[in-house]
Amino acid sequence: MRRFLLLSWVAAGLAAGVVLHLAGWPLQAGWAFTAAALPVALHVGLGLLRALAGGRMGVDVVALAAILGALALGQAATAAVVALMVAGGEALEAWAEGRATAALTSLMARAPRLALRQTDAGLEEIPVADICPGDLLLVRPGATIPADGVLEEAGATLDDSALTGESLPVALVQGAALRSGAVNAGGAFRMRARREAAASTYAAILRLTAAAAEARAPLVRLADRWALGFTLATALVAGGAWAFSGDALRALAVLVVATPCPLILAAPVALMAGIGRAARRGIVVKGGGALERLARVQTVIFDKTGTLTPGRPRLVALDAEPALGRDGALRLGAALAQGSSHPVSTALVAAAAARGLALPVPDAVEEIAGGGLRGVVEEQALLLGAEGFLLAEGLEPRPGFGIAAQVAAAAGSVAWLALDGRVVAAFVMADALRQDAPRAIRRLRALGISRILLLSGDRAAAVAPVGRALRLDAVLAEQAPAAKLEAVRREAAAAPTAMVGDGVNDAPALAAADVGIAMGAAGTAAAAEAGDVVLLVDRVDRVAEAVAIARRSRAIALRAIWLGMGLSGVAMGFAAAGLLPPLAGALVQEGIDVAAILLALTALRPGRQDAAPEALSDAAGLAARQEEHAGLRDLADALGAAAAAPRLETLPALEARLRAEMLPHQRAEERSLYPEAARRLGGADPMAPLIRMHAELETLAERLGTLLRLAEDGTVTEAELRRTLFALEALLRMHLVVEEEMLANLDGA
């Protein structure tokens, strides 16, 4: 506010002086110009004294010399214009920093201060600091969630835009985890606090935000050193011009055009603009120093679990006795799994729900720590667990059973199901890649990242497929925290390195890297505190976006510095030659300042490599089609199982599923999704490969129907059915993968 008051004073004094001069009162005009300039000279002088007291040379000495020199030489109007330049530069800097840090300021402003706690006596309003784990809180419409917790109501709608950059509200159901800092975009709901407000997500974000606002970047400190050298050069040029020409006004003109405002302001404004741009995309950067280090990164190291993979196992393959069937085995296994909170049990229950299986209630469920489950479902004794658990119970898979599952388990683990004393099914669990992980790696390669590694404590069999799928440069498996730390230090010694992780065991490695990037949306507070960059949205592709923003911001800062100082240098040459009088030079320098700062502010806008894609409209139906992919993958599993052992009595139902699920899905895509996606992607005919796959799938489905009709007469061999079923499975799986990759950038996230 003080900066704008000073600018208003100078502008008023300068305007008054111009009016008085035009009215023919030059003496009074000089007084008005002097009155406008002196407060700025005092302000700059006090700033220089504070800088000297802090042990550094203030670079505004040129501006102070220009104002005082102009007054001493009777150039009061020039002094007033220089004062306007200085005051205007500071006001413009304040405005620019306000624009640049708007997203960070918004995070701070949304911090909740009060909460409503529900007790037996009713509702009571308490300070957020008094929230305790287990408290039942009421969140009103439009209120900010004050602490991390669990939703107690049937549903709620939250606005996460300030945290994650996601524009659409998020609908949650009872039992969902709630993060502090999100805003209630629906009706009032109750929640159960899981931790104190000070230990919650939003409190950590606010601490990161405060650090981001206070840190000084190396580029800013470098600009300070350049400014000091520029000041000395200015003194030599001004002194030389005076000595050569004997005209003090030439020296004054040099001082006027040499005021190093672009050098002082451009770097911090550009870097803060980059931090603001990142914050709007759900990326909190701890200051300009972290942003500049991120811009120089050449090596990126990823943790696996929770970073490149979601950290939640899912059912990827299933083998069962033909008499029981795959759905029957999953129904029994998931029913027993309801009695456990183990991640594998949760995955089985989720897989059964996705297939629409109704699960009976298990009886006498007993969980054996580190082994498995024992219980009764529909009066049948069941065992569910790892191979060691079944061996301890005296059971062993019979020869040949579960071979397909064990082959698939090379990258996962197998949970075995035993029914009444015999093994009847094998469930393969794996932590699959995040859908955005391949895109993140490709974007990093496109940005020029020369080396990308995977560093994990997982076993080699689980880690190697991830590295192979993502085409990483190296994979380091079975790494303890100490080994992770040493690996990061080794890479950092060779090139600027970023480490991306989410867990407590990643915190030392994050701190040791040149830049630690924490997955803060679902990661731990320890990782978020140790990281220099925190991703508030649970998407690993934001890592590449953060690098792109950092590189663009640093490049803009350097361009703004060189533009401002280059133009100032040219103007100094004209001033030293007597071709640019002091008053005109002051006006020229004002234009240079504005140009440099406006260029620095362009870091607020998305660049070509960090621009968020334009989301498809709701009418395109992308979300609905993506949800249908889970059912189509189940259909592909059924096609593969049928191909392994074709049974004519079950194939008509499978062919009916193709007509009821796959074909309507394809027609809906071609009618609404593909046309809009084609316009977004550009090119001659970007969706042609997918449409051609649709046609081939329809041809194969029609062929299967024809074979089943001919099979009634016994004119079709089992080999012909196998070939068709295998072809359908392979093409359907490939189509789903290719389609998801092509449309991944169009979800607007």
Image: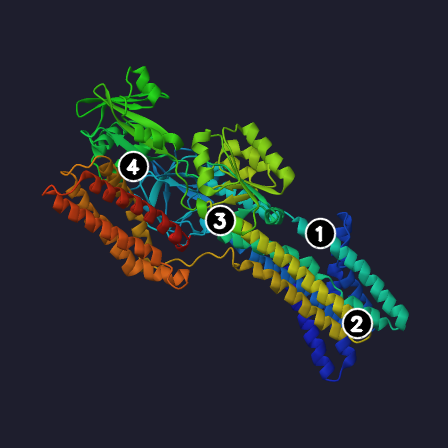
The residue positioned farthest toward the left in the image shown = 713
Disc 1 or 2, which lies upstream in sequence? Answer: 1
- Whole-angstrom CA distance, mark 3 to mark 2, is 51 Å
Asked if the residue under mark 1 is in contact with the one under mark 3, i.e. CB atoms within 8 Å, the reply is no
Asked if the residue under mark 2 is in contact with the one under mark 1, i.e. CB atoms within 8 Å, the reply is no
Asked if the residue under mark 2 is in contact with the one under mark 3, i.e. CB atoms within 8 Å, the reply is no
- Assess disc 1: are there few (<14), some (14-19) or many (≥20) residues with their C-alpha within 10 Å of its C-alpha: few
Q: Amino acid at mark 1?
A: Leu
In percent of the image, x 75 and y 72: which residue is there? Answer: 585
Judged left or right of residue 127, residue 174 is left
In percent of the image, x 32 and y 24: which residue is there? Answer: 385
Q: Which residue, given by chain and number where applicable, does mark 1 sit on?
A: 222
Residue 331 x, y percent position in the rendering: 22, 32
- Assess disc 3: are there few (<14), some (14-19) or many (≥20) residues with their C-alpha within 10 Å of its C-alpha: some
- Nearer the observer, 442 or 24: 442
Q: Which mark is residue 575?
A: 2
Q: Which mark is residue 442?
A: 3
Please identify, in this view, whether the residue under mark 3 or under mark 1 is nearer the observer: 3
Please identify, in this view, whether the residue under mark 3 or under mark 2 is nearer the observer: 3
Q: Amino acid at mark 2?
A: Ala
Q: Amino acid at mark 3?
A: Arg
- Whole-angstrom CA distance, mark 4 to mark 1, is 55 Å
Judged left or right of residue 395, residue 103 is right
Tell me if residue 217 comes above or below residue 523 in the rendering: below
- Helix, strand or loop at mark 4: helix
- Whole-angstrom CA distance, mark 4 to mark 3, is 31 Å
Q: Which residue, given by chain and number where applicable, does mark 4 sit on?
A: 350
